[in-house]
Image (cartoon, helix red, strand yellow):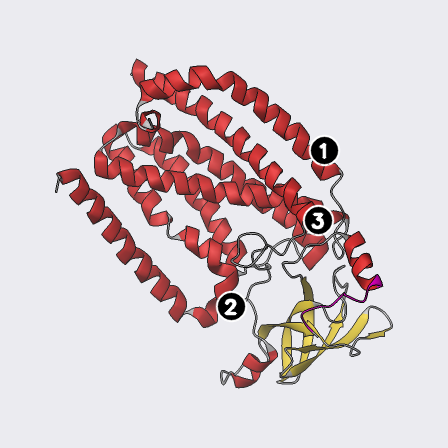
Amino acid sequence: MFKFLINPSRFNKLIDIIFRPLVIITSITLVVSLVLIYFSPLDYQQGLTVKIMYIHVPSAWLSLLTYGVMTFYSIVGLAFKIPFSFIINKAIAPIGAVFTLLCLISGSMWGKPMWGTWWVWDARLTSVAILFIIYLIIIFLNQIFDSREVREKTIAIFILIGSINLPIIKFSVDWWNTLHQPASVSKLSSPSIDISMLQPLLVMTLSFSLIGLIIAILRIKAEILIRKIN
Amino acid sequence: MSLRFQRLILIIITLVFFCSAVLLILFNTQKNIVFFYTPSELIKNDKNLLEKKVRIGGYVKKNSFLQKPLNNYQFKITDNISELLVFYEGILPDLFKEGQGTVVEGVLNNKKIIIASKVYAKHDENYMPASIKKELEKNNQWKKDYK
């Protein structure tokens, strides 16, 4: 049933069926989320600036999710020698990098009016900057090796080493004193964000994920074709 | 056990060891990773921090804020145990007010007075529509967690 996750031809077959509906659903979700955000209430402290959150938080989550997927496929690829997992690693690294950059830029634009600074070297901001650098290294590593086998293994191992950064990013705000505030949504007690702001945030996260998924599908398809030619 | 599962377990064990190594390093250098000290941590700290750039974080003490001419400000930072007097010349961020979290960066005169060169506002993780806050205030239900 889940063969399409590791088998290129199954993947292609499934994509041929679902791609068009997926694009339509994505467009609808994006429009709905933008409308929801337009009508979402202003924050009691931050006013209008709180709307940066609807870009900042989804891109932060997706930068972590993309890396999580790459970590999963690196383990699978190394342990079970499945070539498709390396195709995915190569295809989605730039997507993760873009989400991380979006997160950094929007966070910077949010920090200036609220904290009074574009950038500080606290644990959360620094660890996300490191995540961005790790993504860049993965993209560069894809260019520098001649032998495909060496390249794929090196990158997979590098991804695994870099995955230590994920828990550090997640818990940096709890472990150390940081300027960045602690988590609002993903905590054990009920989220400390009002439901009228949580709903648009979750819908926007869904549309971000769908956009990411579409780009990922296109890149994976292209990568499969390139490997067929070579 | 097949070869591929042995490989899987080896990878996972390596990863666990590697992660614990990095986390051990991070936790043992904790003092250098924190972005700021609280006023109490500052008093307990025996390193010589005077005449050096430090960052102190806490809440702006109620009724301690004084505005003097030419963007000169004076206020106290508290963590409800100890407090620290801050002198600052410059522009304050929008969120800065009494009772709100803040981090100041500057040079310590002594362990009670800091001349700040930068003031950051630190906001908490609570988000709430402005209209709900008004409603709560009307019914006297509005309260903040910190003093």
Query: In percent of the image, x 49 and y 85: which residue is there?
Result: B46
Disc ID at residue A35: 1
Q: Which residues are magenta?
A: B138-146
What is the x, y in percent for residue B12? 26, 49
Instruction: Tell which subunit mark 1 falls on.
Output: A
**For the C terminus of chain A, which image quadrant?**
top left
Query: In percent of the image, x 71 and y 68: which residue is there?
Result: B144
Q: What whole-number distance in Å separates the C-alpha atoms at marks 2 and 3?
A: 26 Å
| Of residues A190 and B123, the one drawn nearer to the viewer in this rendering | A190
Query: In percent of the image, x 74 and y 72: which residue is there?
Result: B88
From this viewpoint, which residue is outermost toward the right?
A: B69
- Going from the N terminus, do you reach mark 1 or mark 3 first? 1
Tell me the amino acid under the disc marked 2.
Val
Q: Residues within 10 Å of mark 3 (few under 14, many from 20)?
A: many
B88 horizontally vs B26: left or right? right
Q: Nearer the viewer, mark 2 or mark 3?
A: 3
A70 vs A177: above or below:
above
Q: Secondary structure at mark 1?
A: helix
Instruction: Examine the image and state in which quarter residue A79 appears.
Output: top left
Tell me the amino acid under the disc marked 1.
Val
Task: Judge whether residue A74 is colored magenta.
Answer: no
Query: In percent of the image, x 67 and y 69: which residue is there?
Result: B145
Q: Work out whether residue A147 can be spotted.
A: no
| Of residues B28 and A215, the one drawn nearer to the viewer in this rendering | A215
From this viewpoint, which residue is outermost toward the front?
A: B139
* Residue on which disc 3 sits: A50
Q: Secondary structure at mark 2?
A: loop
* Residue on which disc 2 sits: B34
